[in-house]
Amino acid sequence: MATIDLAEFDTTAVRAAVSKIRKCASALSEGTRPRIQTISSGIQANLEGETATALENRVGDLRADVNTLVGSMNGLCNALSKYADDLERMAQELKKQLS
């Protein structure tokens, strides 16, 4: 019977990366969103007119950028987790087929 040399993979490393990315996303979300809200409240309380509008627009852009980044990081984690699951499932299936 011929042997097949399967490429080695390390799903533990993939899952460790997922954990680190999730922690970064959480820290970004928990640390940045409240600060953005504080800045927005300060603008509303202390400024008016075109300056306030321009700053509020920029803060809104920043809020959207943070939301996009956090969402992308979470999406990446989901994709990497699925990748690790798929690798493990395929390895098990190949093992069964080869034995």
Image (cartoon, rainbow, N blue to C red):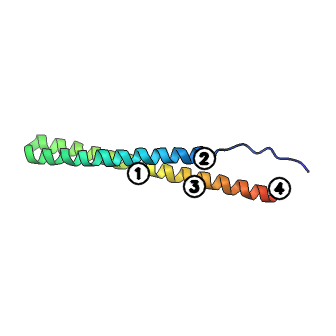
Identify residue type, mark 2.
Answer: Thr
Determine whether, in the image, residue 73 is placed left or right of residue 12. left
Q: CA distance from mark 1 to mark 4?
A: 40 Å
Q: CA distance from mark 2 to mark 1?
A: 23 Å
Q: CA distance from mark 3 to mark 2?
A: 13 Å
Return the mark for residue 71: 1
Which corner quadrant of the image does residue 96 belong to? bottom right
x and y percentages locating residue 60 in the rendered image: 24, 47
Badge 4 element = helix
Return the mark for residue 98: 4
Identify residue type, mark 4.
Answer: Leu
Tags 4 and 3 in contact by the CB under 8 Å rule? Answer: no
Identify residue type, mark 3.
Answer: Lys
Q: Residues within 10 Å of mark 1 (few under 14, many from 20)?
A: some
Return the mark for residue 63: none
Q: Which one is earlier in the sequence, the residue at label 1 or at label 4?
A: 1
Q: Which one is earlier in the sequence, the residue at label 2 or at label 4?
A: 2
Residue at x 19% of width, y 44% of height: 39
Q: Which one is earlier in the sequence, the residue at label 2 or at label 1?
A: 2
In this orientation, does residue 48 appear? no
Q: CA distance from mark 3 to mark 1?
A: 17 Å
Residue at x 81% of width, y 59% of height: 97
| Residue where numbered disc 2 is placed | 12
| Residue where numbered disc 3 is placed | 82
Identify residue type, mark 1.
Answer: Gly
Q: Residues within 10 Å of mark 3 (few under 14, many from 20)?
A: few
Front label number (2 vs 1): 2
Determine whether, in the image, residue 72 is placed left or right of residue 93. left
Front label number (2 vs 4): 2
Q: Which one is earlier in the sequence, the residue at label 4 or at label 3?
A: 3
